[in-house]
Image (tube, rainbow, N blue to C red):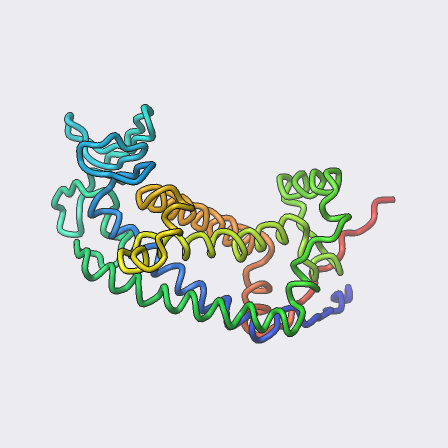
Amino acid sequence: MARQPARHWVYRHTVSTRLWHWLNALTIFIMLMSGLMIFNAHPHLYWGKYGANFDPSWLGIGPTPQGGGELRVYQAHIPTTGVLGHWKDQHGHVQTRAFPYWATIPAHYSLAGARRWHFLFAWVLVLGGTFYVIASLINRHFQRDLAPSRDDLRPRHLWQDIKDHARLRLPRGKAAARYNPLQKLAYIGVIFFLIPMMILTGLAMGPAFDATFPQLLVVFGGRQSARSIHFLCAMGLLAFVLVHLAMVVLAGPIREIRSMITGWFNLPPSRPRRG
């Protein structure tokens, strides 16, 4: 009988990384869904200091005069009937809000309820992220695992990594224990750009904070510009989550999820060398 290949285990994720990962997964999930309900209250985005019903928006989601739904980005009109702007609720009634009930928290229309969920978990995001950054600096997680090396950033190396991902040739053997260049850049972009930008633009939309620190509004070019940037960062974070989940499935969900629960990662066997 053929012998089974020996399993090789490495300790890949520290306790602080695992705790922040699962807490952040819940937090981002609730904040995205509650944010979509807040967007439903005024489903238009603007650039500049002002934005109202009669001002030209660069993005809008809603019903069409013909009785359908659409996503409008500047002058481009994209039909979305049945999904955005014109959809049926759980009782079979047609609704014309931007995002459907299954994508929002709460499921029924409630701006006040959505704001409470959003602000509560915004504090969870800020406090959890702060402790994670402090712990990662102490245990050198950032320097050891996420900081790209000079070789990682070479165009030739990055292009090879892009081609490998496009061909679904994921790292195996000892290489799977390390973050590849695209992973490092993606995680750094989320941790040090997308999440901080969402926090800052969220603060810039708060009247009380604006009264204390009006300079933040100047940096973002006005409250409506801050709202647009906030929305775009949220969509960027959603795109990251979807790609992340797809890569987990492709790399082996049991192996990946187990490592994020226990910290121990079972290395996938190396590819056999071609003769």
- Which quadrant of the rendered structure holds the N terminus? bottom right
- Is 13 displayed left or right of 172 in the figure? left
Q: Residue furthest right?
A: 275
Depth check: 95 or 230 in front? 230
At horizontal 21% and vertical 44% (from top left) the residue drawn is 42
User: Where is 152 relative to 76, above or below?
Assistant: below
- Is 70 displayed left or right of 8 in the figure? left
Image location (x, y in percent) of residue 96: 17, 40
Depth check: 50 or 80 in front? 50
Q: Quadrant of residue 52?
A: top left
Depth check: 143 or 220 in front? 220
Image location (x, y in percent) of residue 9: 70, 71
- Is 123 displayed left or right of 150 in the figure? left
At horizontal 39% and vertical 51% (from top left) the residue drawn is 215
At horizontal 19% and vertical 55% (from top left) the residue drawn is 111
Image location (x, y in percent) of residue 122: 36, 63
At horizontal 40% and vertical 59% (from top left) the residue drawn is 28
* Count of numbered badges drawn on the protein: 0
Q: Quadrant of residue 79?
A: top left
- Is 53 displayed left or right of 152 in the figure? left
User: Where is 195 relative to 166, above or below?
Assistant: below
- Which quadrant of the rendered structure holds the C terminus? top right
Q: Residue furthest top?
A: 75
Image location (x, y in percent) of residue 179: 67, 57
